[in-house]
Image (cartoon, rainbow, N blue to C red):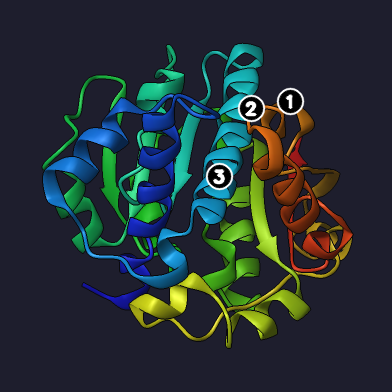
Amino acid sequence: MKNVSKTMYIPLYGKAFVSRKGIILNDPTAEAIWAQEGFSLRGKAKSKWLAYYMGMRSRVFDRWVQQKTKEHPGAVVLHIGCGLDSRVLRVGSTSGCWVDVDFPEVIEERRRYYTESETYRMLAGDARETHWMDSLPQVETAIVALEGLTMYLTDAQLHQLLTALKQHFPRLYILMDCYTSFGAKASKYKNPINTVGVNQTFGVDDPTALAQETGLRFVKEHTMTPEYLIAELKGLEQKLFRKLFAGGFAGKLYRMYELEKR
């Protein structure tokens, strides 16, 4: 499996970890997959602090997707770079269609744990290419989650992906987390993804410019560590997490943006 594909085990572990503790994210599927397979992670990839962060990030994405599907019940939901994530189960597929997209080898692994239905599909596709979009439903609206993906795409590849999505769907809502350029440079030397052989990442510094260049509109920045989730931590852990992962320095490394096309 490609090194980038192996990064899916890091958020999977984080979600299983917090779910077992009964905080932040309820994800029995992540618990079951992790317990069944016993994937090997080491160092910072198994840090409880990173697990808390991964759990919070996913919960924010879940909440956003859930809100958008209520507002647009016939929309297709696309989770591009889905890994082994169970968002379709945590949020629930809508009256439209849900499509989880990732590398062919990831989708092959995913089929061991998930079953397709009339409203749920798994699609092999590389986010650095666009031909797989020909297999997407022809519907008016798409709700797109780009979680843990953009940092592996060059500026040109990210532009190509966003432009292709814009051209495919008349109405589009996107939520994505991004490294900053500073964060991408720092990650080369000190990042849990280094433990699975990934040493090059990319950043976004100006979401407004990115939106304009791809024909989209920048809506707003979201926090990946909302106070209501930090509050689920206790005592010293809560204080340390708030200082290390929710402060101003964290924002210089890693951010979350919402874009749209109406």
Q: Quick one: SS at disc 1?
A: helix
How far separated are the C-alphas under marks 2 and 3?
10 Å
The residue carrying mark 3 is 52
Judge by depth and name the residue closer to the eye, 250 or 259. 250
Q: Earlier in the sequence, mark 2 or mark 3?
A: 3
What is the three-letter code of the residue carrying label 1? Answer: Tyr
Q: Quick one: SS at disc 2?
A: loop
What is the three-letter code of the residue carrying label 2? Answer: Glu
Residue 232, disc? 2
The residue carrying mark 1 is 228
Q: Earlier in the sequence, mark 1 or mark 3?
A: 3
Judge by depth and name the residue closer to the eye, 43 or 163. 43
Q: Position of residue 175 (x, y in %)?
A: 66, 43
Q: Position of residue 108 (x, y in %)?
A: 15, 53
Residue 46 visible in image = yes
The residue carrying pointer 1 sits among few (fewer than 14), some (14 to 19) or many (20 or more) residues within 10 Å by Cα, namely: few
What is the three-letter code of the residue carrying label 3? Answer: Tyr
